[in-house]
Image: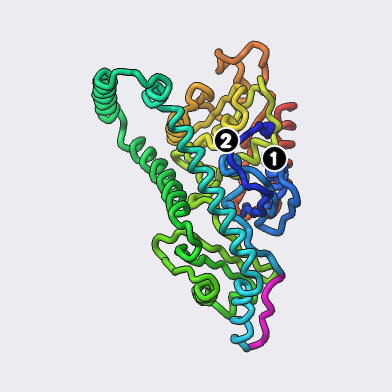
Amino acid sequence: MAATPAHAGPRPAAGARFFCTAGRGLEPFLMREVRARLAATQVEYISGKVFFTTCSDLNMLKKLKSAERLFLLIKKQFPLNVPSVNKGKIFNEMQNLVNDDPESWLNAISIWKNLLELDTKKGKLSQRDANPLKRKVEENDIINPKKLKTEQMQELQESRECQLEKEIEEETPEQDFLTKREKSQEAFQNDVVKAGDTQNQKDLTFRVSCRCSGAIAKTFTAQEVGRVIGIAVMKQFGWKADLRNPNLEIFIHLNDVYSVVGIPVFRVPLASRAYIKTAGLRSTIAWAMASLAEIKAGAFVLDPMCGLGTILLEAAKEWPDVYYVGADASDSQLLGACDNLKAAGLKDKIELLKVSVIECLRGVRKEVPSCPASAALPTTFLSFFRWGTSSKDFTLKISKGLNCCFFFLKC
């Protein structure tokens, strides 16, 4: 993993408690990542979730690669007691998730709003600094307004012409990809604006998302639990329910091991990478595989079954000062990988070859003339095997696969 960069961005005044959801078997990767990247403390995990405390800002939290979604923790406690048939007692216990400690809810809401508002201020400052015309006016107030207006009109006309040329040249799939990315960014900005507009917490609108498993799922549906929690929230805090376009989403997971309540920090999951146009291997698993390879600067990294290039993309984003080569025997996979590299702006960082695995391993040095002379053989290999999504021990399987890979090379 890359070293944690120093950052002076906006952050919570004190350490806030978060949790991330993770794929089965990826919890150890996520625990190591939050410690290294966020300097997190009080790191613990239960199946599918990692809990931690950090002072990091939204900019750093967005960089988590092995997490599916990120939540601000409101409450974590023992599972609800599900008696034989007395639903009234269970309803009461559900309502106590809200009524027992309303202060923890209000504190979490304040931290959530502060995170979004601070991120908005930082975004406005960076936009102002990035605008050369505006900065020029601020530095020299005696600029002729008429001359400035003429220059602005000329630049606007040139930018419009350039935009028209690009729209003619660009293909429809790439436009769709950019539209999706812009929509996800716009959704986040809308959340930020809403958080800033709701100065009074009673003006908040919310919806409840529930997930139930185990004994409680046999007694209640997720919709019934959501309704009970929603009514308790409305009575306790005076917030209004809005299922379509709320300011706030409340996430609740109830099972036989724990009861967890949290607030999603981002509307779009962290695992949905903006730089991946066509998803292949799950991005979190791809990043975990690359991290196991212990890639270092100046290395020669080969993925002999690159598919759509997901592992190479994750590796190149995390460790840029490395020579990457991807190979595959399938034309369709290589075309998809090429589109992904182009969309991510990494076409000059990763070289793609159409070649089988065995041919690739035997003759990679001859097939890649642009490879540095110092790298006679690849120092790192990726994706030597495939496995199902139901793997119970991801770490063990990938370790066995890498061992098989090195054995093959020695032979």
Which residue: 59% across, 61% down?
Answer: 262
Residue 127's x, y, as percent?
44, 33
Q: Does the magenta stretch include residue 300?
A: no
Q: Is residue 83 magenta?
A: yes
Q: Quadrant of the N terminus?
A: top right
Q: Relative to residue 188, is residue 105 drawn left or right?
A: right
Which residue: 31% across, 32% down?
Answer: 171
Which residue: 54% across, 37% down?
Answer: 310
**Residue type at numbered disc 1:** Gly
Q: Based on the displayed image, in which of its 4 quarters is residue 298 positioned?
A: top right
Residue 165's x, y, as percent?
26, 25
Residue span colored magenta: 78-85
Residue 286 at least partly seen: no
Pointer 1 residue: 401
Pointer 2 residue: 314
Which residue: 46% across, 34% down?
Answer: 340
Q: In this view, does 111 lie above or below 280?
A: below
Q: Which residue lies furthest to the front in this view?
A: 142
Circle 2: is it few (<14), some (14-19), or many (20+) Cα within 10 Å? Answer: many
Q: How is the rendered protein coloured?
A: rainbow
